[in-house]
Amino acid sequence: MNLGKAFTFAFEDKDWIKKLGIAGLVMLIPLIGQLTVSGWALEVTRRVIQREPETLPDWGAFGDYLVKGLKIFVIGLVYALPIILISICANLPVMFMGNGGDETVATMVGLISTCVSCLAAIYGIALWFLIPAALANFVVSGELGAAFRFSEVIALVRAAPAAYLLALLGGIVAGLIAGLGVILCVIGVIFTMAYAYVIQGHLWGQAYNEAIAKKGM
């Protein structure tokens, strides 16, 4: 993993100001903007994986980026379904009990809810590793179903857990950088948010390549 490359590659593009600026402006469009920029950033992941020139994608394929962003949303939603269901199960007993009921039963309900909540938290942590691998599998094949080949996705994470951990930590740093844009008001946010997206996309591509290399493929 080359963390430094993920943070610097964008500036190697002579049109980086224009491309990041457009991305930032697109993000101002409610919902559609975030989806489109997500798809645009995933193109960075694809280029890293395919070892193509690591320049920022241009904005001539807006529709394709939006479609890809919608697919990213579907993938994230499907992977999040278990945690949504677990959370519902954790809260249902409390909702039905209300403020009344036997004290012993209430205690047991509380324990069950706590255990289920812990399970949801563990699965939530797993998602931080699984979703990047699923998205990379999708973008490589171009097929939405590739993201749901769970054995392949899990195998990627198992092959290079340290790489996916570094991608996660790098993403956290990217998020902090995005937050710095608030200090610089709207103009700063436009650039830093878009910049954070491409950093994350680059890191996901690197993690996938390292996993494939360690699997001997």
Image (cartoon, helix red, strand yellow):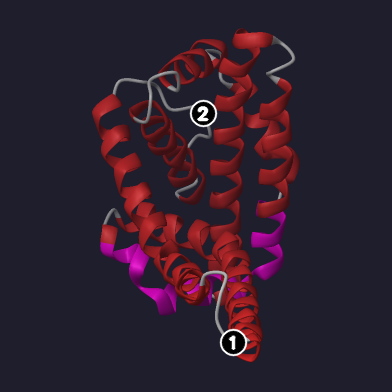
Q: Nearest the camera: 196 or 152?
A: 196
Relative image position of residue 162 (x, y in whole percent): 71, 66
- In the rendered image, which quarter is residue 122 located in? bottom right
Residue underneath mark 2: 55
Determine the residue positioned at 51% across, 28% down.
55
Determine the residue positioned at 47% across, 36% down.
41
Dot 2 amino acid type: Thr
Q: Secondary structure at mark 2?
A: loop
Question: Is residue 217 in sight in this rendering?
Answer: no
Segment colored magenta: 145-167
Q: Residues within 10 Å of mark 1 (few under 14, many from 20)?
A: few
Relative image position of residue 6 (x, y in whole percent): 66, 39
Q: Nearest the camera: 96 or 22?
A: 96
Do the residues bearing badges 2 and 1 touch, measured as CB atoms within 8 Å? no
Relative image position of residue 32 (x, y in whole percent): 33, 29
Residue underneath mark 1: 102
Q: Secondary structure at mark 1?
A: loop
Q: Residues within 10 Å of mark 2 (few under 14, many from 20)?
A: some
- Residue 52 in magenta? no
